[in-house]
């Protein structure tokens, strides 16, 4: 993979920058690098944090930064972008009865039915996992649904809430504070508590960076989203 830079980030981390702007191409490059690093199994990596345009590799010891730099460059050189079409697709049912749906529709000057139609039209990609555990920032959101986050965040938003904030839509995987517009809820198991209790399991959350999501509007849900 070309046009990738590597720089030191503190005493025991490296920052791999693979794009300058956020789009489907940058996401494909990110997914390709993650896959290549997973296959390479470089030693000494304590944590790997993907962002929109970069990956942060944190090592267990400072000397491993220099020791692994050559191998890391080879992994990056051989990595190939992984297009969205090859990513897992999750079909998620949404009941569009969120607390903010009517106010949000007025904010963007659309009817509620138009908001629902525009929100369910795309197949989204998980661009990054965000501010709370497992929270997916989904795009690309139709520009007609772009709106600033609420001026007064809620102290608690229920797990399973489907929301819009800025240029993204997302799903609250756990109950947490939040300032996004609540437009609906899902009963899909976006967070599995049983898997989370299994030490070392990375499967507790349904969605991962690069996955695809398709929303389907329903009038009722088999299980109420937790409040």
Image (cartoon, grey):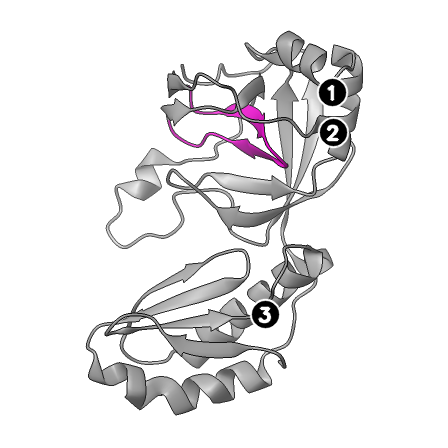
Q: In the rendered view, would you say 20 is above or below 36?
A: above
User: Contact, CB < 8 Å: mark 1 with mark 3?
Assistant: no
Assign a secondary structure to mark 1.
helix
Q: Quadrant of residue 204?
A: top left
In the image: residue 169, left or right of residue 44: right
Question: Neighbour class for label 1 at 10 Å: few (<14), some, many (≥20)?
Answer: many
User: Contact, CB < 8 Å: mark 1 with mark 2?
Assistant: yes
Assign a secondary structure to mark 3.
helix
- Residue sitting at 61 percent across and 64 percent down? 20
Whichever of labels 3 and 2 marks the residue nearer the N terminus, that label is: 3
In the image: residue 5, left or right of residue 120: left
- Residue sitting at 32 percent across and 37 percent down? 194
Cα–Cα span, label 3 and label 2: 27 Å
Cα–Cα span, label 1 and label 3: 33 Å
Q: Is residue 213 visible to us here?
A: yes
Point out which mark residue 32 bears. Answer: 3
Magenta stretch: residue 173 in it? yes
Q: Is residue 39 visible to us here?
A: no
Point out which mark residue 116 bears. Answer: 1
Q: Quadrant of the N terminus?
A: bottom right
Point out which mark residue 120 bears. Answer: 2
- Residue sitting at 51 percent across and 78 percent down? 5
Q: Quadrant of residue 28?
A: bottom right
Question: Neighbour class for label 2 at 10 Å: few (<14), some, many (≥20)?
Answer: some
Q: Which residues are magenta?
A: 158-174
Assign a secondary structure to mark 2.
helix
Give 205 or 24, whichever is nearer the viewer. 24
Question: Neighbour class for label 3 at 10 Å: few (<14), some, many (≥20)?
Answer: many
Whole-percent x, y for residue 137 in the image: 55, 41
């Amino acid at each position: 993979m070309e046009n990738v830079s590597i720089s030191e980030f503190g005493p025991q981390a490296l920052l791999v920058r693979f794009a300058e702007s956020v789009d489907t191409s940058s996401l494909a490059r990110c997914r390709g690098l993650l896959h290549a690093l997973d296959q390479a199994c470089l030693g000494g990596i304590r944590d790997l944090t993907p962002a929109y345009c970069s990956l942060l590799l944190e090592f267990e010891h400072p000397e491993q930064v220099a020791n692994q730099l050559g191998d890391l460059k080879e992994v990056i050189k051989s990595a190939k972008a992984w297009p969205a079409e090859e990513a897992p697709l999750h079909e998620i049912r949404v009941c569009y009865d969120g607390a903010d749906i009517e106010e949000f529709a007025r904010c963007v000057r659309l009817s509620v039915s138009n908001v629902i139609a525009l929100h369910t039209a795309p197949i989204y990609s998980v661009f990054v996992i965000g501010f709370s555990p497992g929270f997916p920032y989904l795009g690309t959101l139709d520009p007609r649904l772009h709106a600033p986050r609420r001026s007064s965040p809620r102290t608690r938003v229920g797990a399973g809430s489907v929301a819009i904030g800025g240029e993204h839509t997302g799903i609250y995987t756990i109950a947490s504070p939040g300032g996004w517009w609540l437009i609906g809820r899902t009963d899909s198991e976006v967070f599995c508590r049983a898997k989370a209790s299994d030490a070392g399991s990375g499967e507790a959350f349904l969605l991962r960076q690069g996955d695809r999501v398709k929303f389907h509007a329903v009038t009722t849900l088999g299980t109420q989203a937790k409040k």
